[in-house]
Image: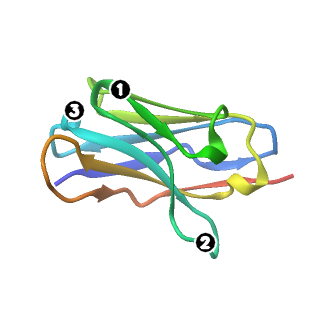
Amino acid sequence: QVQLVESGGGLVRPGGSLRLSCAASGAPFATYAMGWYRQAPGKERELVATIAPAGISTNYADSIKGRFTVSRDDAKNTVSLQMNSLKPEDTAVYYCNAHPFYTYGRDYWGKGTLVTVSQ
């Protein structure tokens, strides 16, 4: 079992920045690809960014490329999402995800943290 706890959400003005963090426990963190997903009101959950173990590769949604940066610290079992130049359309609940990278297995999800971009 993997437990994921997100933090760092809040209210920010357009053009501002936020940094989300996700703390993982309960399983070998370094064997999981970590990801951030988001779900806006009335929309389906969508991929924001993923990062492979040891940060050997990353993947970003086109809508956030150049504005968001995903990183991980395998020694501290954390993954972060630095969000810059935020737009109102970035408003959503952001979820942390853990996906087994080397074996088959289930995904794990955090409960989410709300990001609101508004004047």
Amino acid type, mark 1? Gly
On the image, the x and y values in percent for residue 79 come to 40, 35
Q: Residue at x 26, y 52 (%)?
A: 3
Q: Amino acid at mark 3?
A: Ala
As displayed, is residue 4 above or below residue 67? below
Amino acid found under the numbered disc labelled 2: Lys
| 3 or 1: tag closer to the N-terminus | 3
Are the two marked residues, 2 and 3, in contact with CB atoms closer than 8 angstroms? no
The nearer-to-camera label among 3 and 1 is 1
Residue that appears at 29% across and 25% down:
54
Q: From the image, tell me which residue sits under label 2.
A: 43
* Mark with earlier residue (1, 2): 2
Left or right, residue 92 beside residue 35 = right
Q: Secondary structure at mark 1?
A: helix
Kindly identify the residue that appears in the image at 12 percent across and 46 percent down. 103
Disc 3: which residue = 30
Residue matched to label 1: 55
Label 2 and label 3: CA atoms lie apart by 31 Å
Tag shown at residue 36: none
On screen, residue 78 above or below 92: above
Q: In this image, 116 relative to 27: left or right?
A: right
**Residue 88's quadrant in the figure?**
bottom right
Q: Secondary structure at mark 2?
A: loop
Q: Residue furthest right?
A: 119
Colour setup of the view: rainbow
